[in-house]
Amino acid sequence: MLRKIGFIGLGTVGQHMAANLTKGDYELTVYDPNADKVAEVVAMGATAAATAAEASRGKDLVIIIMTETDMLGPIFFGESGILTGLEAGTIVADMGSPSLETTLRMAEEASKKRCLFLDAPVWGSREHAANGLLTIIVGGDPAVIGRCREPFSCFGLNTIRVGQIGDATKMKFIVNLVQAALVQVLAEGLVFGEKMGFNADKILEVLDTRGVASPLFHLKGRSMCRGDFTRSLALKYVNDQMHLVMNAARLVGLHLPAAEAVSRVYEQGVEAGFGEEDFSAVIKVLRK
């Protein structure tokens, strides 16, 4: 059984994932550059680490959920980073959404230290994380995935293996593309309808009844109607993810015209100062 867990990255989703792990029979050590976030999880029973290396040392499982910039910087590769603390036999699960190049580089470096690596990005919002309802998309050895199912079940409802290391990152690109495009096109529909004289609630009532209905449309549509852009998934992160999607498409020689248009709108959202808000705030770009 995996008992000693290191958790690095207490952002919007990661903090709730770690909080749910404190409810299990685990020795949980956490690290994040934000000391206040660390203190909140420590109050629930976790132990604080002074560095990412310390959080990784002597662990059965190390879970990482950080941004691409953090992973390329000191958090993973730095002198006091995760790689420095890893010991042979440790399972490393990267549950963030970095580029494919970074995922493969992390896996290679972990392998040099005789660690077992899982490419395991999570999909879901802050609410999904808090309620243990995330989807975990995994690439890697099925036997290693099997060993992780119990701790993963603390914060994930579904664990879906899609192939080998790198395949889960590729699948997350698809998820990110479709999710970003759906919310952006919903925003366009609401703004278009409002300009034609319809109430946004009435538009959603119609959309909720038939083929285009979806939980995402319902949730984000209601947020747009209320003007409540409390962060569940930050617009700036969706913008970053779309850049990764477009780069991946270029690498395979594919032109994605709709994705290019969607990416430009999220870029405008960041430039307009909406980056720290929920990505449903993309509607504010269209209303300007």
Image: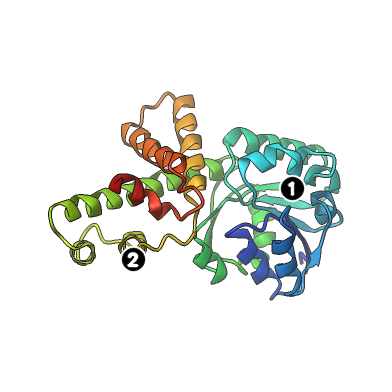
The answer to whether residue 152 is visible is no
Instruction: Write the residue at 78% across / 46% down.
Output: 82
N-terminal-most mark, 1 or 2: 1
Check disc 2 and report the residue beneath it.
Answer: 226
| Secondary structure type for disc 1 | strand
Check disc 1 and report the residue beneath it.
Answer: 116
| Secondary structure type for disc 2 | helix
Q: Is residue 238 above or below residue 207?
A: above
Q: Quadrant of residue 203?
A: bottom left
Residue 170 location (% of width, % of height): 51, 40
Left or right position of 121 against 282: right
Residue 176 location (% of width, % of height): 45, 46
Instruction: Write the residue at 47% across / 49% down.
Output: 235
Residue most extreme to the top: 253
Q: Quadrant of residue 16?
A: bottom right
Residue 270 location (% of width, % of height): 46, 42
- Amino acid at dot 1: Leu
Q: Quadrant of the C terminus?
A: top left
The answer to whether residue 77 is visible is yes
Q: Nearer the viewer, mark 1 or mark 2?
A: 2
